Image (cartoon, grey):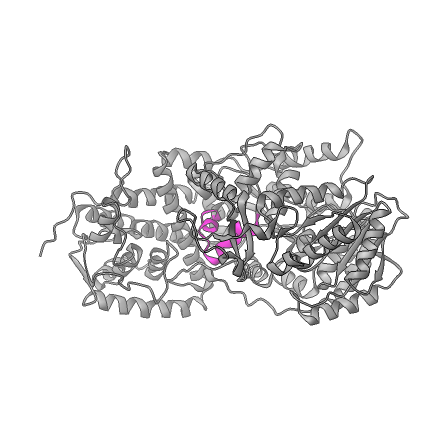
Amino acid sequence: MTVEHPERLLAKSRQPGKDEITLRRHLFETEQAALQVFTLGGRWGRNWCRFFKLATRDEQEQFLLHLRLAALLHDIGKANEDFYAAVTRPGFFQQTLRHEHLSALLLHLPEVRSWLKQNTGLDLEVITGAVLSHHIKASEAEWCQPKAKTRLRLFYSHPEVDAVLDRIKEVAQLPDTMRLRADVWANTVPWSGAWEDGRRSARRFIRELRRDDRRLSLLMAVKAGLIVADAVASGLVREGHDIDGWIKERVHSLPVTADGVTAGILDPKARQLSKGQPFDWHEFQKRAVTLGPRALLLAACGAGKTVAAWKWAAAQAAEREIGKVIFLYPTRGTATEGFRDYVGFAPEDEAGLLHGTARYELDAIAENPTEATRGKNYETEDRLFALGFWSKRYFSATVDQFLGFMEHSYTGLCLLPVLADSALIIDEVHSFDRHMFDNLICFLKTFDVPVLCMTATLPPSRRDELTDAGLRVYPTAAERGELAGLEDKENHPRYKLETTGDENSALRIAADEYKNGRRVLWVVNTVSRCQRIARRLERRCSIKPLVYHSRFRLRDRKDRHVETVAAFKQTTDARIAITTQVCEMSLDLDADVLITEYAPVSSLVQRFGRANRHLIRGMDFRARLVVYRPENDLPYARKELDAAEAFLKKLGAGDISQRLMSELLEEYALSERVADGTARLLEGGYYATPGTFRDVDEFTRPCVLNGEKDLAEVKACLDTHKPYDAFVINVPEKFSRAVEERPAWLPKYLGVASERFYDPHYGFMTEQEEAD
């Protein structure tokens, strides 16, 4: 029976004033994009293969062949009546089967497998896995499970499909021609048999991959490569770009050089620091060029690790052909600071800030520029999403943006060619939650890219995992003996420690020190206590402190961040700030007095590093460290705070240096379980479902406040396609349901919270806190 079919099959919805994108055209353009981005004669293709440890020429050619075939097959399932209706009839959205599920199912029809197996070098499971998972919406339970009808008309006998099959024959060098005559899908023979064969093959494939690292590498390279090629073909055509010209300009650009890193980042930073005086980098920073492609930099707060990291990146650019330097941070705030302080020095078309609220932060930077960013415009091709960053050379980003590919993040996968073409620096690795650290260890063991991890403090168990993953520790004990400047900094007495009874006695100390003209930083473990202490200081002591934590609207949090940093840069006036753990990471705070609740040992060392950081009070000054046990242990475990108590007792009441704290950290930090070396990307086989890179906070939700002004401004941003991040706030889940009427135009992921619990100075407060 001949099935009537449209004259032209469409791969995309019709757009007014634009050419139709036929299925044949899209599949051919995806193959073209794959071939041009990953050509083995280009730097990106070579670095991609090196990244996935495809070392031999045969393995590299096998990768490119499989990628091209997956590109030609990935959307062939769109040749069906439901998909055609979806792209030609406004309002039609219920499709019986996902098109990529049909594409993969086709590869398990006996006649198709027999045809492809004429090339004995093809790994059909690799091709099928890439095709099935290219939209990251494939699990065993979902594959080809109908959502509407039980029969679906197919257009596989269409001339466009015939043309694609002929191209596959040419690329795979197959002797025979293939023509498909299956006109209807139903859960009957031959489709039911193909589905059963596919499920059996998928289970067997996963078992085989656990014993075959080379085959796993090929699968991951082809899976990720197909997502990239599809994004290029779809995005560039949608925006009217010429694929060939765009790729030549952005992919096949000149490599980064050591001189480029020096002139673009390090020299202007040196001029900023020198203030016109003779200047030279510390020996500790200079020696970073000798570390090789994998290193773990451990040095005290304020030692100059960031400059050392850029020195290392310059050395990597001298030793291998790379096109990018990527600096990753654990939070959006620290990534923005890294951009302001370093990446922003680069030419505007080469510098990229990449995290969830980067557009908003860049607008704020333009309004209040630093020496590095003044007069620059860092716009990207927004409508190309992640591809718009391909032309950048220097990045400051959150770790999720680039390493999220381990959990099938679409953005991370689209940025993966950039990562493979880079020297990578990962800061504050001590702060990674357990899931983040597991993914980091798996990344280091699985992929080949130059990596420098760094932090001031690291529990021995984590250091051992990183060294087991191939990182060289710098500086070693022997190297420290040769680095007089670093030794002097780390051994110099900076602190005096004392224990006080509770929050009440700490409150008196804070008020007294503030009235004596000191800069006081008080760190607590929960937002609620942060807010409570701040209100108590205001009510009882007539002191209105700075308040800084995670539960602000972004526009207010930015202001609180700027105020807090500024408060501890000056030395003439008394200041007091009450903060949560947000102060621990990469913030250049320099307090005279540091008050803190007990916390895990590594967190305490980080907090102490925010006091007497730059020795600006002179070599004889000792910062006052005041510690007390909080009223309850949460969010930490009792054993963590017990270990902290033992650590603090061992520090004692005498002079304390950063070196002493580091040495005692080795003794008192608790051991953790060892990472199991797995991640969703490695375990997927045929399938791919997105996960989260971090441990998920199931108790908070992003919201907007229900005040008329906030809602009106968010609506205006949505209507004009501008970022609305300034108005988003994470609140406890139960408060995200405080308002029953939710505007229909609000994005689904956003809740609505009552503005009566919000104060721009204190943040979002619960009813109990408000009533206190």
Residue at image x 28%, y 32%?
Answer: 17
Q: Quadrant of residue 96?
A: bottom left
Can you see residue 323? Answer: no
Q: Residue 603, position in %: x, y?
A: 71, 59
Query: What is the number of callouts on the image?
Result: 0
Q: Residue 400 magenta-drawn?
A: yes
Would you say 52 lies left or right of 272 here? left
Q: Residue 62 magenta-drawn?
A: no
Q: Residue 686, position in %: x, y?
A: 37, 62
Q: Residue 571, position in %: x, y?
A: 81, 40
Residue at image x 48%, y 49%?
Answer: 416
Q: Residue 60, position in %: x, y?
A: 42, 51
Residue 407 against residue 237 in the figure, above or below: below
Image quadrant occupied by the N terminus: bottom left
Would you say 624 lies left or right of 91 here? right
Residue closer to the observer: 80 or 30: 80
Residue at image x 39%, y 56%?
Answer: 136
Residue 644 against residue 115 in the figure, above or below: below
Residue ranking furthest to the right: 620
Residue ranking furthest to the left: 1
Question: Magenta span: helix, strand or loop, mainly?
Answer: helix
Can you see residue 76? Answer: yes
Residue 366 against residue 117 in the figure, above or below: above
Residue closer to the observer: 332 or 493: 332
Residue at image x 25%, y 61%?
Answer: 113
Q: Which residues are magenta?
A: 398-416
Residue closer to the observer: 287 or 156: 156
Q: Quadrant of residue 772?
A: bottom right
